[in-house]
Image (tube, helix red, strand yellow):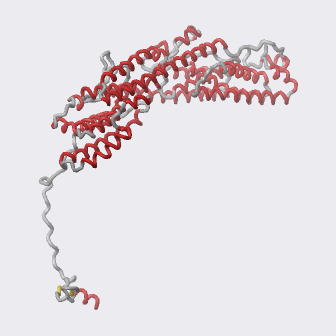
Amino acid sequence: WRFIRRHTLRPRRICGPHRNLVVPHQNMSSNKSPAPAPPKADPSSSPRPEPPLYFFSILSASGSKASPSLATFSLKDLYPEFRASDERREKALSRGRLIDSQVNTTRSLLSQHLPQSSEIRSSLAAVYELVTDDSNPSRPNETEAETEKTPENMDITSTTSSQSRHPREGSLQWKYEDVVSLHAYLHFLSHGTLIRLSDLNFNFQDEEYLGGVISFCHDLSRYAVGRAILRDATSIEMARDVTTQLLRCLLKFDFRNGPLRKKYDSVKWALKRLETILYELVVTEGKTASVALNGNADAKSDVSPMDTSKDDAEGSPSDHKRSKVEIERVSMAEMEQIRQRMEHRDALREKVIKRCRDSQKAAKQAIFALHRGDVKRSEKLLSQCEDIAKELTPIIEEEPKLRYGSFTNSLEEYAEAKLFAIWLGEKRLGKFQTNGDAEVPFVNAEEYVGGLCDLTGEVGRYAVHRGTKRDIDEVKLCLATNTQILSEIKSMGYLPRGLWKKMDQLKRSVENLEHMVYELSFLQGSNGEMRERIAAPMMGDLNSGDGDCDEKEDDRY
């Protein structure tokens, strides 16, 4: 109570120069009403935030040279093409899963039925029904002759000449290799030889056939383990001979680094496994030693590994007479044709890579010339790029797989240079057209969008150059251009292949230009007070290589 009375009832004394002033302390126990709250303002009459800045309205108000078509630029015409590409890919992935399931079902039936049984035949027919599904071609331009053929009209010449060389959608290439491996395994069990490419009921590509038969060698190594348990040296010899002859053929191929090269290296391990099993079988059964060490198959060995009736009638496989002539279990002539075709494609690939390097170099130099204002030189370099693209078009039509790689990269670089030239000259964005009057010829939709994304980097470099000259209107035009490109690409929703990784660079370009316009806007209201602070970082960026280019950059390429 003493504490309460001291701090609530007694007056407070102020120390210091005003110590004689006595201030009564507020009585905490008083029941005074609180001060009235200030009146609330009407929300309708209070100020509201202004809408976001629309740079095209600033450009029109300031009398900019920007073309009206820049504000109305749209990529909506490309939506159906990209959507159809996405649907084809999803259908291919779904069909690949069905093929994989049916192939595994067929393999599981082999443990219960013979290869010639109706169950195996019907299951294999179901696999080919999924493979030859015409509702989902690899590319929309494939013809009916490229999707299916019948055994009656099969021959090596017609099969190879009508091969579909379009890239497979999704994971179909790997699934087709599994189908070839399964069919080769069934063919071996029925005939004891390697299946020919012309004997398959579908136009598999050479790479799919080779990948499938290489995987088939690993099936033979597992098959040999089971036959070794039953002491069946003859069947293991057939598997060993097939693998040996196949490896002998593959040694003549010049595989470049890729999936086939890795698979080819595994054939040697499969052959080593077969020879090890055969050797262990020999040392444990003396009377089959002559059979295994001979390395030649039976002269009358047209029977399949699963056919044991002849062995039952004549006794042990070691009682058969051996021929000094090795039976051809792999079609050497067809493998040689495949090797020649692949060498021809490798020669085309090398030519495309070399010429695309020249085209890409010319396109880069054209961009540097545009930054320097040398329009005539840029036109000459762009014409050189078009001539190279026209030269390589027949090769791409012959081998469509070569489009995706060096050729696509060179066309994206050409599209970037062409779009930059149009934007500098007419202050607008070139549109994608497929007719003869296309502003950016030779490119498809994917390459056009890739070049459009790369264009924003050159627009940003041009903005840095104009910013050093205090040309804020041109910088605003650059920002409006990149903003329009970013909004249109983001609204597409789906971008094929590797275009998504360019989105981060595009966003950073827009953010940098916004900051540049923000800095330059101080110059209009501060009478040059911010001039030195703004110019220093800009000149630093320019000296670091982000600004204009000179002749030295041409020499680097």
In the image, what residue occupies the spot 19% across and 49% down? 526
538 or 251, nearer to the observer: 538
Residue 439 in percent (x, y) is at 30, 21
Quarter assignment of residue 75: top left
* Placement of the C terminus among the 4 image quadrants: top left
Q: How many marks?
A: 0
* Placement of the N terminus among the 4 image quadrants: bottom left
In the image, what residue occupies the spot 67% across and 18% down? 249
* Left or right for 421, reference 342: left
Quarter assignment of residue 128: top right
Q: Is residue 507 visible?
A: no
* Left or right for 501, reference 72: right
Quarter assignment of residue 487: top left
Q: Single out the residue that lies furthest toward the bottom.
A: 2
* Left or right for 87, reference 346: left
Q: Is residue 66 visible?
A: yes
71 or 414, nearer to the observer: 414
Residue 147 in percent (x, y) is at 50, 16
Residue 547 in percent (x, y) is at 34, 37
Q: Single out the residue that lies furthest toward the right.
A: 286
Does 144 appear above or below 265?
above
Residue 125 in percent (x, y) is at 57, 20
Does 538 appear above or below 367?
below
